[in-house]
């Protein structure tokens, strides 16, 4: 077994009202960043895990996302690849 | 009839729920620790409000994997009564006992105030003594109460009459202004298909005494007693 670090981004599902993202966008507009069109606030999770290879590590994290880390009703997740740790 | 109130680390309405049962019904109520594996013969289960596991990750997301939730799910599967109040509603949704999810309030503020909700479904064990359209006033206290569900499920929730409560104004209309947290279709509470599991964001257990502003919460506890004895 090798060790891997897997980075996961979890974001509110597109199309759902994201009041937190909207509040941040409004604040950025107030600061003068008028070009900002949209902001979404999510979570960034770093998981260190043992696995046979990178693909197995990713597959395990995918299942973690489906069962706990992301809410299937309201969130989408993106796994940014497993890096040897 | 014996009531069991599940205490998770961070629950803070479990004592209120114990008090509610004793006060309104005079029935025995025990607290069940989330790490327990049996329901101690309880007939009715209450998932109380609070901030289980500090709302880490998402409200209710970690509590749903507490050991006792396996027993609670089996209890629900048998058709026995379960209610999720506030954080308990969030836990019940995360556990898949009820459809949907609760997201951050649309206005981002934590809301602590009395609201009026309208009874939409009386075919549940928790609203059997209500009449359809009955308006109840009870407090809310939550930051993540915006009921959300995908479009296909919403169609089923509305079509099958799974909406139990909606936020309404003083005249009983489900207006946008009355929809304090921005929930889809003003939804304040839902049930499962069988009607034994109900979840809602408002706190019936805090609406039992006129001194505290409302006694409208009583009818839910009286309903479940009547339903189980029927």
Image (cartoon, coloured by chain):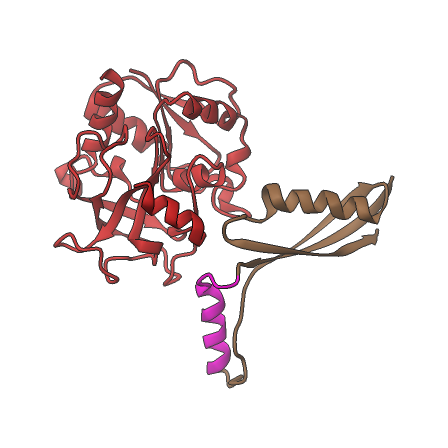
Chain colours: A brown, B red
What stretch of residues is rendered in magenta? A14-30
Residue positioned 38% across, 50% down in the render = B145
Question: In which quadrant of the rendered image does the N terminus of chain B lie?
Answer: top left
In the image, residue B45 lies at what x, y percent? Answer: 37, 25
In the image, residue A32 lies at what x, y percent? Answer: 51, 86
**Dominant secondary structure of the residues highlighted in magenta in the image:** helix
Residue positioned 58% across, 55% down in the render = A76
Nearer the observer, B108 or A39: A39
Q: Is residue B111 left or right of residue B131?
A: right
* Magenta segment includes B8: no
In the image, residue B129 lies at what x, y percent? Answer: 17, 30
Nearer the observer, A52 or B149: B149
Residue positioned 51% across, 85% down in the render = A34
Question: In which quadrant of the rendered image does the C terminus of chain B lie?
Answer: top left
In the image, residue B128 lies at what x, y percent? Answer: 21, 29
Residue B200: name its quadrant: top left
Q: Is residue B215 above or below residue B56?
A: above
Can residue B151 be seen in this snapshot?
yes
* Magenta segment includes A17: yes
Q: Is residue A59 left or right of residue B228?
A: right
Residue positioned 43% across, 56% down in the render = B104
Nearer the observer, B115 or B187: B187
């Amino acid at each position: 077994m090798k060790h891997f670090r897997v980075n996961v981004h979890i974001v509110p599902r597109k199309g759902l009202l994201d009041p937190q993202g909207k509040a941040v966008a409004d604040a950025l507009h107030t600061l003068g960043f008028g070009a900002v069109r949209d902001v979404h606030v999510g979570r960034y999770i770093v998981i260190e895990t043992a696995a046979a290879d990178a693909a197995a590590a990713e597959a395990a994290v995918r299942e973690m996302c489906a069962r706990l880390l992301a809410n299937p009703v309201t969130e989408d997740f993106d796994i940014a690849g497993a890096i040897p740790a | 009839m014996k009531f069991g109130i599940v205490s998770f680390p961070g629950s803070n309405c479990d004592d209120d729920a114990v008090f509610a049962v004793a006060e309104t019904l005079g029935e025995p109520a025990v607290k069940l620790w989330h790490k327990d594996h049996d329901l101690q013969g309880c007939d009715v289960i209450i998932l109380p409000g609070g901030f289980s596991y500090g709302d880490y990750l998402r409200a209710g997301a970690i509590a749903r994997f507490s050991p006792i939730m396996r027993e609670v799910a089996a209890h629900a599967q048998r058709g026995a009564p379960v209610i999720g109040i506030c954080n308990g509603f969030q836990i019940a949704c995360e556990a898949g006992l009820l459809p949907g999810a609760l997201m951050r309030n649309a206005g981002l503020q934590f809301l602590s105030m009395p609201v009026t909700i309208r009874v939409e479904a009386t075919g549940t064990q928790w609203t059997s003594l209500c009449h359809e359209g009955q308006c109840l006033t009870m407090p809310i206290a939550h930051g993540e109460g915006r009921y959300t569900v995908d479009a296909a499920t919403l169609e089923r929730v509305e079509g099958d009459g799974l909406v139990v409560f909606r936020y309404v104004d003083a005249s009983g209309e489900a207006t946008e202004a009355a929809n304090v947290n921005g929930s889809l279709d003003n939804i304040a509470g839902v049930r499962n298909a069988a009607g034994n599991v109900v979840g809602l964001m408002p706190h019936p257990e805090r609406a039992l005494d006129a001194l505290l502003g409302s006694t409208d919460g009583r009818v839910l506890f009286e309903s479940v007693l009547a339903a189980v004895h029927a």
